[in-house]
Amino acid sequence: MDDKTTATRLALAAGQGDQSAAAAFIRATQQQVWRFIAHLAGPNEADDLTQETYLRALRSLPKFAAASSAHTWLFVIARRVVVDHHRAAAARPQPARLEDRQSITGSRGGFPVEDKVILRRLLDHLLPERREAFVATQVLGLSYAEAAEVCGCPVGTIRSRVARARADLITAMADTDTPGNWDRRSS
């Protein structure tokens, strides 16, 4: 049984009130959800937003019908949590803050520290919808169909966004000697 099938089975059992299945479901999915959120909202926000994702998911588990995999269902919730977070943040003034380098280069994931910093900076400069599609498919390994479901758009749109994100990343990597040139691409 693969990870997606196992997570779906655990989610269904948790929805029926099995507390050990709920704990196992969280353990089985938490790292990928954290990574997804960290790429969308930043590593400084990922812990809190991951917790909010699971709070929403646990409340909704009794209604989970496995129309899609539990991973896909959970990423949809995580994306909504991030969107809600961005909306709330945009509605209130934010003080300037220095980025916490240690949280970016923490122990999560398998890349060397320098690669994590470079990847984070490159991804930060993608348009949000391109970053979302790229992270879902290329970092988390979701299929284009699953990413389309998570992002709430057609599969062709995901393919286009990933292709444009790749092109933007290639351009940005060519400009790594001059980070000031990393602007948000508009097409």
Image: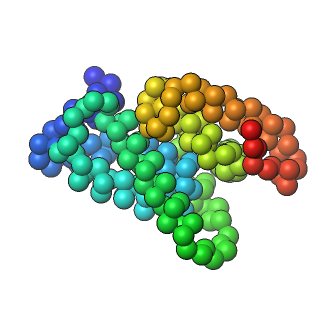
Residue at x-position 57% and y-position 66%: 90
Q: Tell me if residue 134 comes above or below residue 178 in the rendering.
A: above
Q: Tell me if residue 163 comes above or below residue 119 in the rendering.
A: above
In the rendered view of the protein, which quadrant contains the C terminus? Answer: top right
Taking the image as shown, residue 130 lies to the left or right of residue 122, namely: left
Residue 165 in view, yes or no = yes
Residue most extreme to the right = 178
Taking the image as shown, residue 117 lies to the left or right of residue 22, namely: right
Identify which residue, 3 or 146, lies in the foreground. 146
Residue at x-position 56% and y-position 30%: 158
Which colour assignment does the render follow? rainbow
Taking the image as shown, residue 6 lies to the left or right of residue 170, namely: left
Identify which residue, 9 or 154, lies in the foreground. 154
Report x, y in % for residue 42.
57, 56
Residue at x-position 48% and y-position 39%: 151
Q: Quadrant of residue 171?
A: top right
In the rendered view of the protein, which quadrant contains the N terminus? Answer: top left
Residue at x-position 17% and y-position 45%: 62
Q: How many marks?
A: 0
Q: Tell me if residue 75 comes above or below residue 92 in the rendering.
A: above
Q: Tell me if residue 30 comes above or below residue 13 in the rendering.
A: below
Report x, y in % for residue 146.
43, 29
Report x, y in % for residue 141.
50, 30
Residue 142 in view, yes or no = no
